[in-house]
Structures are given as structure tokens and as C-alpha cells.
Image (cartoon, helix red, strand yellow):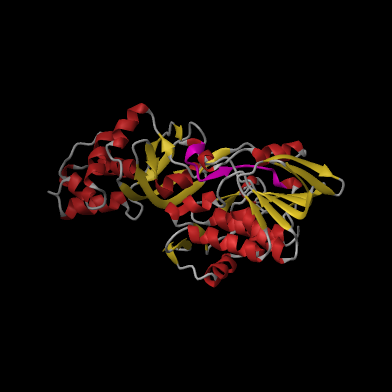
Amino acid sequence: MKTYDVVVIGAGAAGLMCALTAGYRGRRVRVIDHANKAGKKILMSGGGRCNFTNLATAPKHFFSRNPHFAISALKRYTPQDFVELVERHGIDYVEKAPGQLFCAESAKEIVAMLLTECEWAGVEVTLSTAVDEVERHGEGMRLVAGSERIEAGAVVVATGGLSIPTLGATGFGYELARRFGLAVTSTQAALVPFTVTSQWKAELGALAGLSSDVAIRCGDGHYREPLLFTHRGLSGPGMLQASSHWMPGAPVQVDWFPDIDVAANLADQRQNAPRRMLSGWLNDTLPKRLVQALMRWLEWDDRALATLSNREIEALATGLEQWQFKPAGTEGWRTAEVTLGGIETGAVSSKTFAVRDLPQLYFIGEVLDVTGQLGGFNFQWAWASGVACGQAV
């Protein structure tokens, strides 16, 4: 029987951050993960370059049934704190979009940094080992992992959500929470591309690879992000963001001209360039193939601007600024970046992340009902919740 102060289940972003923080406090820490590599999701994120934080991180960028839950941890460990850690390890980074920081070279550097910090903190990391049993044992916990029986003063569950099962995602954390009497909200794939009906698949597939900077509305979400056509449907940052708000059967609205008052601009062009064709005006802003498709979808004939009536201009403006489609669904867990929903936070301390009625059990990171928008927010939540837990465990 091996004994540790802390056993962390999950060698991802939150788990490793918690482990190294606790290790530096003099705690004897063991990390156990069933995957064959630590930080698999870190390695594939951001196109292999890891969008490791967002300088604009604030509670408003997160979804949760308890929107106040994330405030404490996010205040205590900020994006600047993580940037300082990155800089101490000599990792170069770039700001691709306002606030969004990526590794200049490779996400492998972030995983190497975390594992190095764990080594310096005296943390043991065990991979390719599944945790089979977790049970309360007096004032501590007892685990079975592989052929080992382990006693721990505390267990931290950092097993993530259900997204991208090929990287090892499972529902283990949710099952464990339910076993100890915690409620789990409904979960759904989020930050995930939309699929379309077979009728639309051929139409959109012909535009695969085209991207356009648009404004997107879905439910209560409104984003100004690029849209990307794929062979399966619609993707790109804008659609990934919208997926966190989408409910089956609901429409997604696209404004193809977010920087232009279409009606006013067309009226001006009709006055000053009456012989100009409608397609020519559209081509100033949108790719030619997309223009052809939009005119077909909205059943417009190519005409000289001089022939457009005021009513027709208003109709064109509405079609371009409020174009709607109803997704058939999403690509699901296979490509989802995160899980929306998770363990209800009411039973968990926002300061320590301990279960209120079982203080030797902790839950951190994505397994909880806290989900960030696209752009590095989910990693910042992992770092912040990991540090807060590591300081308390």
C-alpha cells in the first residue's frame, strides 16, 4: 500500500498545474492518467501551438449555471501569472488575435514546462494506468490503479470532459461525482463545427476552404469572427463560438457585411455608379464563388444597380445582413474542443474546489460546469482552478 498526501487523477492542464502547485508546498503528490502521454489535449490545441491563455480573461467569457463560481480562482491566478511562468522557461509566444497568446513554435513546450515543474516539485507522474476504484477511507481516500492499492489524504479529479475521445476523453469524472452524490448537469459538445442537411452539403462543399469575416448571432450569443466552409458544413471561429449557444432546431444568423450598412451603400452606389452590376458590388467584399452561391440561395438575378428599387435594396440588405440557416447538428464529441456542462458547482467550494461534504475529494478544470469561450479562456480556467486547488489540497 503506497501513501501520498495528494493523488491527482488526470495529467492534463488542470491536473498538472494542481500537482506542481501542491508539490511546491511540500505535499507528496502522485499524478495518474490512463493515457500514454501527458497533456494530449494541450499538444493538439491551437493547431499544435496551444492558445495557452487570453489576456482579456474575465468571468463574462464563461458559461455556467453558477456564473459567479469561477470569479475567485480567476482573480487569484491571472493570465499574467501564467505568462510569467512561460517566460521563465524561455518559451517564445505570439499574440495571434487581441489577447490570444500562442506558442511561437510548438505546444510541446507547454507540456514540457509543466512536466519539468512537476519534476522540480517532486511530483510522481504515472501514465498508461487507469484508476479503477476510488473510495472514502476514514479521513482520507483509497484508490486502486492498475495493480496498485494507494492511500491518499486527498484525491483531485482533473479528468476533463467528453470532447475528443480519441485523445482519451471519458465520462470517468462524471461517474465518480455521481457515485459520491454530486449532481451533473446535461452535457453537450461545444466549440464544435456545424453539420448541414444533405441538400446543403453539396452547396457548402463546393465552397470548402473559403473563409469570410462575418458577424454571427445564435441564441443570446453574438460574435464577430471568421466563418469557414467545409465539406461537412460550417466551421471557423465564429461557428465554433455559436455552437456553445445552439439548441437543436434553432437557426444561426450570419451578417456577411458586418462593417457596411448595405442599404445605404447600395443606394449610394445606385446613384454614383448606376451601370455597375450587383455581382460586381458584392465581389468588392466577398469571394467570387461565395457571391455566386449567395445570389443563387437568395434567388437574385445579376442586374445593374440602377434597376434596383428602394424596396429591392431593403430586401437585399435583409438577405445579406440576416442570412439564416438551420444546422442539422454538430460534429459532436469527435471534434468538439470542450464540453458544455458538467459537475454542478453548488456542492464544490469556489475557493478550494473541495466537495463541501467530503473535503478530501476535489474537482477542477473542465469536469466542472464551467466552460470558456474560444480563444484561450478554457486553458486559463485550467491553470486558475489547478492553482487554487493546489494551494488548498
333 and 148: which is toward the camera: 148
Judge whether residue 83 can be spotted in this image: yes
Residue 71 seen in the current view: no
Where residue 284 appears, as percent x and y from the top left, is: 22, 53
Left or right of 141, for residue 102: left
Residue shown at the point (21%, 45%) measured from the top left = 288
Q: How many marks?
A: 0
Q: Which quadrant of the view contains residue 278? A: top left
Q: Residue at x 18, y 48 (%)?
A: 280
Give percent across and percent down for residue 165.
53, 39
Residue 200: image location, x then y, percent: 34, 31
Position of the C terminus by quadrant: bottom right
Q: Residue furthest top?
A: 198
- The residue positioned farthest toward the left in the image shown: 275
Query: For the point 51% across and 39% down, which residue is it?
Result: 166
Is residue 344 in the magenta section? yes
The stretch of residues the image draws in magenta is: 333-345
- Please, is residue 201 above or below residue 354 in the view? above
As drawn, the residue found furthest toward the right would be: 138
- Quadrant in the rendering for residue 106: bottom left
**In this picture, residue 179 sits left or right of residue 225:** right
Residue 8 among those drawn in magenta: no
- Residue at 52% x, 64% y is 55
